[in-house]
């Protein structure tokens, strides 16, 4: 058994869905369970419609909804139109096929129209209440996955696949942290097995939604944007599958962001520890939480390109081989802000550090990086985080300063602390740049430095040219 997750760009239009159907069909002997994201930018557009309605502009919200209705209707029309002409000796067989396709098309349109029929009164209610709560956002956002999974299910049935649609809210139990719900795995895992395993054993292909779940009281939740990867990993771990496949629009984990460096290469194999570092520091190919359930069960995670299904992709595994190229990839995160906290020296060192991290915990401030020295703590935080309360509270004990418009560059590889001279090589490659922070030792798998946000592309290119000029062909694809 395997899990195959298809992202929004993999199902963004009819040709994309047809490619997905072919990919699934090829993997039928492996008994796949399918997890689907919303089509294209549907989730963001649904939330935009909700925001417009809640602001009092119901007309604009309904217009946005009509655009989405037409978008999904066009995809359905293209996918479920009967093109086969009944001729020859197989006339009755072909007529039956056409009948089944026509019935499936009617059912698919009815299902999708039903979803839009549910959304309209929700928007009307928002326009009256003039409020969009986190719980309301999750309810609206869930329809993207519900519609896409419905369409993919019918597209599979059209080619004779015994696909069955399953509502993830029946088994993906979460807490009530709306928009960022945490799965309750002790409850969810048995339900996943109960709902999915018998279907697979009966020869069916379950198709379900990523991203969405439900509280134990039946209220719809979401796992946070791009949470479909996490859904796939949870399902895979619960079912003890042989492989978790993430199908997206890139060839896997790359040596750098191909949007900035088109010459970036595919990393063919990487360890879980390295991949976790990359997702933490900005690599967008996977949701950061995806790797934990898979790693715990030692299930390999493959990342493939649905537009180039024969490309090797990347495998994340517990058995990554050693490489003569120590750095596997360079991730970046921008913009970030640096908060520098310097003790007045009036408190003992350990007490000062405890005060800083106690304040962080109370403020629920997420930090990408914390560098500690004798009298200083440097924190890298998202600019959208409210750092001001932290700064005000700490000013009684320390000098606190904020440096905006910075970026993290993170070199990731296997046991970089044991690579002789790596920091010196980085300094040499970037000798024309000023660093605010360089950190090695917090993790054996990363070396982190801070540069100005406007210098990321130049610094990334220089490091990439320097570090990957002699790449190991066993680890990197050309």
Image (cartoon, rainbow, N blue to C red):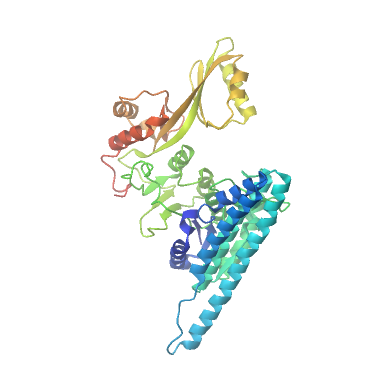
Residue 269 appears in the picture as rendered: yes
x and y, in percent, of residue 128 in the image:
73, 47
- Please name whichever residue, 3 or 248, is drawn nearer the observer in this view of the structure: 248
Residue drawn at x 59%, y 47% as measured from the top left: 48
x and y, in percent, of residue 289 in the image:
53, 44
- Please name whichever residue, 435 or 299, is drawn nearer the observer in this view of the structure: 435
Q: Quadrant of residue 271?
A: top left
- Please name whichever residue, 247 or 315, is drawn nearer the observer in this view of the structure: 247
Residue drawn at x 43%, y 48% as measured from the top left: 316
170 vs 478, left or right, is: right
x and y, in percent, of residue 145 in the image:
58, 56
Up the image or down, 74 lies above or below 450; here it is below
Q: Quadrant of residue 393?
A: top right
Up the image or down, 466 lies above or below 167; here it is above
Residue 173 appears in the picture as rendered: no
In the rendered image, the residue lying farthest to the top is: 346
Count of marks overlaid on the render: 0
In the rendered image, the residue lying farthest to the bottom is: 89
């Amino acid at each position: 058994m395997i899990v195959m997750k298809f992202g929004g760009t993999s199902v963004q239009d009819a040709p994309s869905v047809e490619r997905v159907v072919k990919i699934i069909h090829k993997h039928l002997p492996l008994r796949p369970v399918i997890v689907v994201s919303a089509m294209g930018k549907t989730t963001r557009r649904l939330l935009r419609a909700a925001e417009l309605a809640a602001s009092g502009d119901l007309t604009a919200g309904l217009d946005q909804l009509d655009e989405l209705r037409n978008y999904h209707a066009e995809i359905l029309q293209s996918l479920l139109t009967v093109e086969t002409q009944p001729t020859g000796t197989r006339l009755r067989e072909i007529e039956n096929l056409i009948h089944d396709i026509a019935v499936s098309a009617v059912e698919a349109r009815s299902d999708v129209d039903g979803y839009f029929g549910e959304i309209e009164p929700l928007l009307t209610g928002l326009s009256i209440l003039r409020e969009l709560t986190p719980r309301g956002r999750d309810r609206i956002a869930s329809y993207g996955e519900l519609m896409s999974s419905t369409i993919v299910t019918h597209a599979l049935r059209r080619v004779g696949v015994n696909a069955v649609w399953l509502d993830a809210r029946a088994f993906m139990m979460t807490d009530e942290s709306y928009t960022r719900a945490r799965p309750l795995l002790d409850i969810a895992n048995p339900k996943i097995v109960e709902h999915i395993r018998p279907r697979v054993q009966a020869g069916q292909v379950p198709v379900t939604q990523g991203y969405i779940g439900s509280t134990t009281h039946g209220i719809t939740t979401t796992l946070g944007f791009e949470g479909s990867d996490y859904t796939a990993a949870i399902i895979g771990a619960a079912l003890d599958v042989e492989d978790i496949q993430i199908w997206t629009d890139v060839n896997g984990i790359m040596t750098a962001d191909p949007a900035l460096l088109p010459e970036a290469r595919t990393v063919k194999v990487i360890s879980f520890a390295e991949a976790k570092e990359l997702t933490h520091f900005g690599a967008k190919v996977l949701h950061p939480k995806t790797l934990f359930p898979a790693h715990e069960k030692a299930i390999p995670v493959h990342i493939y390109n649905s537009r180039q299904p024969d490309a090797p992709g990347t495998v994340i595994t517990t058995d990554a081989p050693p490489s003569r190229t120590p750095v596997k990839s360079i991730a970046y995160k921008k913009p970030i802000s640096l908060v520098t906290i310097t003790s007045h020296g009036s408190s003992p060192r350990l007490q000062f550090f405890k005060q800083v991290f106690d304040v962080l915990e109370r403020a629920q401030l997420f930090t990408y990086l914390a560098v500690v020295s004798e009298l200083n703590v440097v924190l890298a935080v998202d600019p959208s985080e409210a750092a001001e309360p932290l700064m005000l509270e700490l000013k009684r004990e320390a000098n606190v300063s904020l440096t905006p418009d910075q970026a993290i560059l993170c070199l990731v590889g296997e046991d970089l602390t044991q690579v002789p001279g790596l920091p010196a090589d980085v300094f040499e490659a970037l000798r024309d740049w000023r660093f605010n922070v360089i950190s090695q030792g917090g993790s054996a798998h990363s070396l982190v430095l801070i540069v100005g946000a406007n210098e990321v592309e130049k610094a990334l290119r220089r490091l990439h040219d320097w570090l990957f000029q002699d790449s190991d062909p066993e680890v990197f694809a050309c």
